[in-house]
Amino acid sequence: MAEIGRMDKATARLLRFLGNGGCRLMEEGALTRLARPDGAETTVISDVVAASIRCGLAVRRGEKLFATREARSWLRRFLAAREEAFLDQHRTVETTEIKDGG
């Protein structure tokens, strides 16, 4: 999944948009327009869609794109790693010394 590594944020955005219902796919050169059944639309870079399919995070069926089961796990790990990085940045680390009474 090193290929995805360069596009983590865009991949996460794509997978979150796909959700459980999938999207209709409309390719427009270097961009791909996605439309959910609820009417929401977004545009992503076509390379992100292609990389997600190659890595098994999304599957194309005709003119529709769906997230796979692996996408849910990948997204959970991605979001956890970002949260951990935030916590590392803002965490206060204190050192204490406990002396043995003996």
Image (tube, grey):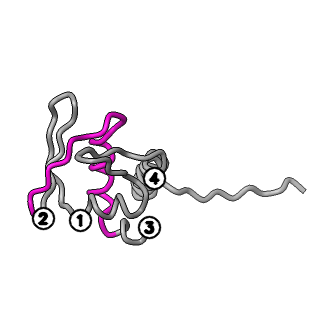
Mark 2 is on which residue type?
Answer: Ala
Q: Nearest the camera: 25 or 6?
A: 25
Relative vertical location of residue 38 with respect to residue 57 in this rendering, above or below: above
Q: Earlier in the sequence, mark 3 or mark 4?
A: 3
Mark 3 is on which residue type?
Answer: Met
Q: Earlier in the sequence, mark 1 or mark 4?
A: 1
Give coordinates of residue 77: x percent, y percent.
48, 52
Give coordinates of residue 12: x percent, y percent.
33, 52
Q: Are marks 1 and 2 in contact (CB under 8 Å)?
A: yes
The residue positioned 36% from the left and 65% from the top of the image is 4
Q: Which residue is mark 2?
A: 30
Residue at the farthest left position: 28
Q: Which residue is mark 3?
A: 1
Mark 1 is on which residue type?
Answer: Asp
What distance separates the C-alpha of mark 2 from that of mark 3?
21 Å
Give coordinates of residue 18: x percent, y percent.
30, 42
What distance separates the C-alpha of mark 4 from that of mark 2?
25 Å
Q: Which mark is residue 47?
A: 1
Q: Which residues are magenta?
A: 6-29
Q: Are marks 1 and 3 in contact (CB under 8 Å)?
A: no
